[in-house]
Image (tube, rainbow, N blue to C red):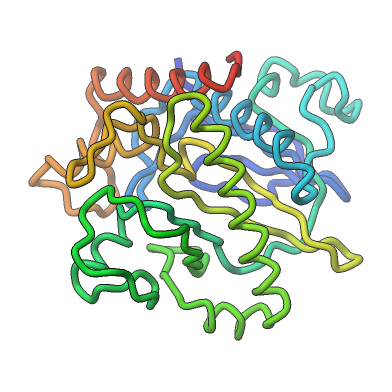
Amino acid sequence: MSLLGTDLPFPVFRRGKVRDVYALGEHLLLVATDRISAFDCVMPQGIPDKGRILTQVANFWFHATRDLIPNHLVATQVKDYLAELQPYREQLEGRSILVRRTEPLPVECVVRGYLAGSGLKEYQADGTVCGLKLPPGLRLADRLPEPIFTPATKEDEGHDINISFERMAEIVGEERAAQLRQVSLALYQRGVELAAQRGILLADTKFEFGVLPDGSLIVIDEVLTPDSSRYWLADTWRPGQNPPSLDKQFLRDYLETLPTWNKQAPAPDLPQPIIQGIRERYLDLASRFGVEV
């Protein structure tokens, strides 16, 4: 059975597509439900255990990258939470984290090492990705000459919008923009290295950052999960073909086969084989990083 939502007796900070967030003074409680979204629509059915998988994979990466940049983690075990949270251990265990409250930056920091997704569509039309000129003749799933930083806006409704680095600098300031690019590329490279040891290619990913009261930057939300990243199996990767993945692409590919759905809410019901297929892929990814769910 999937957990599609929570109803805890604490102030709701926000409910995202996947996470329910509660305000607890200087901290936030992030609870990952089993909801799954695609094309900015939340599917009617959840994926059993997905919230636990996302939380534990993200925690693996928060710990594996903390030498590169601090993150928002305060506690990952319910026994270490505030006393008023203890009665809700059954709902929270394994799928929640207690984090520092920050001022989130209004941009998403995307790093791409391969050509796929919206980057492929722009490249096919203009030979660029987020305004960055790329060599001619690249195909779907081709490795780029070097990873590229391609930021996007964070939209409350509808699709996030790819923007240039220059536009991002106008939004957050030149010094902060340069810092975000440097840190994002370093985080991506760490992901590439650790994924490669496990037979996986990290094609692309996105990061979110927040600013503490003293002005210091930390990474927030989630890091290198199958919801925020594109993971391909290295031994089946073939440029020019859509590689088998261990992420949400399996769901997107299925939805693209539905001629009657216009990618607007309400989203269609998911058949059981698709639900099970997503769950198996997420569990496979988690197991490769030694994450137990």
Figure quadrant of residue 235 = top left
Residue 161: horizontal and vertical position, in percent?
Answer: 41, 70
- Which quadrant would the C terminus be assigned to in this image? top right
Closer-to-camera residue (201/79): 201
Horizontal arrangement in the rendering, residue 197 relative to residue 273 (left or right): right
Closer-to-camera residue (73/13): 73
Figure quadrant of residue 168 = bottom right
Horizontal arrangement in the rendering, residue 73 relative to residue 84 (left or right): left
Residue furthest to the left: 259
The answer, for residue 155, to whether it is visible in the render is no
Closer-to-camera residue (67/95): 67
From what the image shows, is residue 252 above or below residue 163?
above
Residue 47: horizontal and vertical position, in percent?
Answer: 41, 24
Residue 109: horizontal and vertical position, in percent?
Answer: 55, 61
From what the image shows, is residue 61 above or below residue 280?
below
Residue 71: horizontal and vertical position, in percent?
Answer: 76, 47
Residue at the image point whose x is 12% and y is 40% from the top: 257
From what the image shows, is residue 197 above or below residue 123?
above
Residue at the image point whose x is 32% and y is 70% from the top: 134
